[in-house]
Amino acid sequence: MSFLLIKGEMFHCRDCGSSYTIEFEGGAKETQIGDENVFRQINLNEKFMPPTYDCKNQGYYFHEFILCEDCLKNSLDNQTIIYKVNDYPPFENLFYLNNKFSELIKDIAQENIDGFISKIDLNFCQQLHPEAYKETIGQKLFKLTSHKNELTKNYIKKAKLQIGISFEDYIKSSENYLEVVKEYSYLVSPYEQESKNLLNNSVKKYYREIDLSQTVNLNPYICYESTVRKRVVPLIKFSVFDGAYNIPTAKLKDILSKSVEQRLILTGTPAFGAMFDEVYKKVVTLGIK
């Protein structure tokens, strides 16, 4: 039931009720739009299409509610901004780059575990946390196999914060990390400034122009060849907009308040858990000089 013979799209202005039609390449074609959409679009076609139009044989239109250009102009104020086709909100790029490069840093952290572990000896453990060292692996009992495991666990527990900081510092000194941070800083800089401008100008909402030349996925849950249709650019040009969307002010302020390193280095990622496991394996094998 999730397939429907779809011919094109029909946009309806939420304010004035004007309608705009656009066809899909290939004409009426069975398109997988999802069960909920099937029922909704059948009802909308019954509401908007003329009684003489045979949807089952000629094809249904996919109805969407938007703002036309004239009504959008009447909705604008100094706290609202419009993003035209191929013009994207800067915070979307900011969030995207932050997520992308955070994943790269996670990989770099994983790659640096072995190098960090190779640094660990008794002198390193003592300098890292003298008090924890003295109370645990610095004791004579550490020579005894029966006590090594427990004393090692206690040392790592007491010195966990210092070990994590030391591992972060080790990652940050690696060439790969420095290259990634440099590239991130370069790419994100213009989006940071544009995002700051939005906040400084107290912009609260935004509208986006719908790209009438793009391929569109009509199923909200999956994306396959059978769910995607290519729009035919209309001969008579018109512009339609969706929104308004809220500017993610709180999230923007949070990320802009952090340094690059604070954004990208994530204590508690899988690499840190793996690192602590390897620290235990290394420390428990150390002997007293």
Image: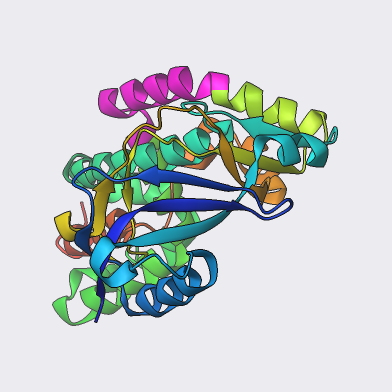
Asked if residue 127 shows in the view, the reply is no
Residue at 23% across / 47% down in the picture? 110
Find residue 269 and report its image quarter: bottom left
Residue at 18% across / 46% down in the picture? 26
Rendered location of residue 47, percent (x, y): 54, 72
Examine the structure image and report whether residue 83 is included in the region drawn in magenta: no
Compared with 54, 178 (above or below) is: above
Rendered location of residue 279, percent (x, y): 25, 58
Q: Nearer the viewer, residue 34 or 64?
A: 64
Give the main secondary structure, helix, strand or loop, of the magenta stretch: helix
* Magenta region, residue range: 171-190
Compared with 137, 125 (above or below) is: above
70 displayed left or right of 207: right
Asked if residue 180 shows in the view, the reply is yes
Q: Nearer the viewer, residue 41 or 141?
A: 41
Residue at 39% across / 78% down in the picture? 36
Find residue 231 and report its image quarter: top left
